[in-house]
Amino acid sequence: MAATVAKPGPVPDVGQEHDLRPVANMEAGGVSQGNAGQRILPQHQRLKLTDFALVRTLGTGTFARVCLVRPAVGSEEEREKVFALKILRKAEVIKLKQIDHVRDERQILTDVAGYPFITELITTFSDYDSLYMLLDYIPGGELFSYLRRHRRFPEEWAQFYAAEIVLVLEFLHEKQGGVAYRDLKPENLLLDSQGHVKLVDFGFAKRLGSRDDRPVETYTLCGTPEYLAPEVIQNKGHTTAVDWWALGILIYEFLTGYPPFWHQNPIEIYKQIIEKPVIFPAEPPISPSAQHIIRSFCTVDRSRRLGNISGGSQQVKSHPFFQGVDWDALLRKQIRPPIQPNVRFPGDAQCFDIYPEDDGKREPYTEEMASQYDKLFEKF
Amino acid sequence: MSGTTFTSPFAANSNPFGNDGARSESGGTPSAELLNVIEEDENDTITSPTTPSFGFSNPSNSGFHGPFGGDGTFDPLPPAMRTPPNPDSYPAQYNFGRRTSVSAESLKPVADNNDNWTPPSYPKTQEQLGRLKKAIEGNFLFSHLDDEQNAQILGALQEKPIPAKDIKVITQGDAGDYFYIVEKGSFDVYVNPSGALQAGPEGMGNRVGTIQAGGSFGELALMYNAPRAATVVSADSGCTLWALDRVTFRRILMESTFARRRLYESFLEEVPLLSSLTPYERSKIADALETLKFPAGHTIIQQGDIGQSFFLLESGEADAYIDNKPQSVRHYRKGDFFGELALLNDAPRAASVVSTTEVKVATLGKRAFARLLGPVEGIMRRTKYVGVKSGVEDMDPLHAS
């Protein structure tokens, strides 16, 4: 297990947020701010599910459920803390052929821990039929919920969220040595207590890596239909450029309230993505610089796509759409976010929608499955 | 009116119910009309309709609104739904719920796995191949494939006899792994509004269409595993289908793309002008290379023209000629390159290069290069070229090695 995590350069100022951040090493009860290297628990201190009390479900996916939890043991002070626990059923992971993705998610989250705009993995553990990822709890809820409630965002808001995402992509692509996130959408952006972006769900994140000293593109189709880049749909092999495409779709959705390519039938979405230019509605009016950046991101030809071309994220940052953004202040979270989530106390979950709780029904994880697959989950 | 313009340019495959009356536009506000007009213009510039009609018929043209949106082949939605959302009234049909992520099986190229994989190949007659080619040529999942990929895909299609009437080929709501092309007979398409096949005699729901020879269905299964949007049942006895599964399809594309990428990268390594590129930069260039095919006797570059792009010879052979003299001054084989000085300056081509056989070249323009990596001069400044006595300008303008 990768116990040491390189702290990304300029160390972010997390002081303001301190009171909401989980303590990295619960067992020791010590605060490990600024000590990113120790945030993964050693093996003998492995947690188990009964160490936590379930508060409620925060979200559900095809094979995972994220719950708000509190420590069930320890001092009163310990038990006041809150975490998000992502629970994955091994049988479902195997059935949906997502073993590699789950392993990558764990590894990449470990590698990027400490970056201010990414959810922080504290530790992982497992039992007979499930895998668990203990994450810091981000109380502001999904940006998705705010976007749907407001229908669309004014351009300054879109600029703010897009700018924080540019920092995340710059970090993943350029400072983490080529990590593609591959599932950018409002549903995967949470707001912290002050309203800053936290990117969550690294289920499709992929370290492109290299072989014989060459970076290697990847071929697995994954993402969300409306946000898929053309090269993913056409199976051409894809790189981090897919995230810039998705950022264009995201800015469009911020400004209009819906994505540029949509249809009830996904095949029709894919045809549009490959064949159709992005078209802007007359209402609301979208500024020329916003239209330009969206079209520059949503460019089928990757040798022309903003973010992927010479200059990388630097060129994105100097685009007129981001005019006036103080990137250093932004990274230090010194820019006041447009939305301040109504979080009354650290474990407040009112910003999240209500989901039905786990009904206990699940595919059994059989002995055969365990003997065949458990070795693949041994890092959990 | 505008509706017809928005039907997919991919012809019958994408919209087997294409020639239906639902095309009559559903009105809408003036601004919606305006958008449709914009669409119309855009449409004109993009593609030309390709495939001919496959003889689809649409008996019950009743607004089927694909509840799961599963299989793209069935798309009888009224065209208004394919237009951009009405800007004033919020798009009524857009589903504003959370969107589910999709994912296919993770695949790694053979070169990474050390296992052996060759695509399956099932024998077919020339006539069959011709029909199959026609059946997929307008489909967006196949339209960008090169000849070899196409040949492998056609080879991998497997014949599936459907001997009797009323056999369910795909079942609404079930997991989908196969794409089908109809070789013989016809198939009825049913949709149950509940989103899945139900028990009982009416369980298949309403018949929404018929697919005949040359038509196809189930293409979404080639992308990832999604629930089938309809039930498809044989309407005759003695039908024949061709089937292709997702993993085979995706592997064929992946292996050939992967191999070509590596080939390009190794070619690029041989170009002295680009020797200082990092592997990452070479990979970006390889990404942007465009493959062109020329018959024998084609003039690929013309002496005296201002060079705009450089070429890597991927297959075939070519010769360089100067001043229309019949004597070849240089012979090119696979892996050779020419015209790379165009990346550097606007000097006229010093020779013509003519293909001696059918050739495949990978090419990249000066501007694309500059967009990706900045000006070549900058690249060169970090190289040993700076110290080379003769200098690049003195090199053979056709071949720098």
Image: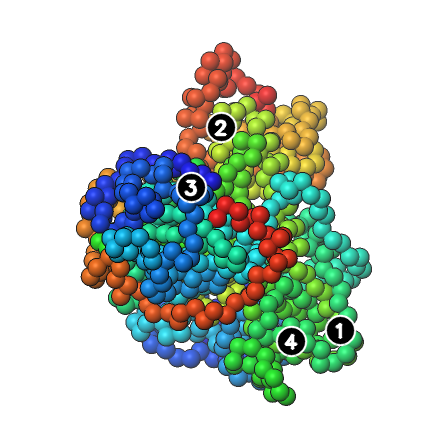
- Could you tell me how far apart the alpha carbons at marks 2 and 1 are, in whole angstroms? 56 Å
Q: Nearer the viewer, residue B348 or A183?
A: A183
Residue A42 numbered mark, or none: 3
Q: Chain of mark 3?
A: A
Labels 3 and 4 in the same subunit: no
Frontmost of labels 2 and 1 is 1
* Mark 4 nearby-residue class (10 Å; few <14, some 14–19, many ≥20): many
User: What's the amino acid at mark 2?
Assistant: Leu
Q: Residue at x 43, y 34 (%)?
A: B373
| SS under mark 3 | loop
- The chain carrying label 4 is B
* Kind of residue indicated by mark 3: Pro
Mark 3–mark 4 Cα distance, whole angstroms, equals: 55 Å
Q: Viewer-proximal residue, A95 or B172?
A: A95
Q: Which residue is mark 2?
A: B277
Asked if the residue at tag 1 contacts the one at tag 3, i.e. Cβ–Cβ closer than 8 Å, the answer is: no
Kindly report the distance in space between the C-alpha atoms of the residues bearing marks 2 and 4. 53 Å
Q: Residues within 10 Å of mark 2 (few under 14, many from 20)?
A: some
Query: Label 1 amino acid?
Result: Ile
Question: From what the image shows, is residue A155 above or below residue B160?
Answer: above
Which residue corresponds to mark 4?
B232
The location of residue A167, given as percent across then percent down, is 32, 44
Residue under numbered circle 1: B162
Return the residue nearer the eye: B34 or B98: B98
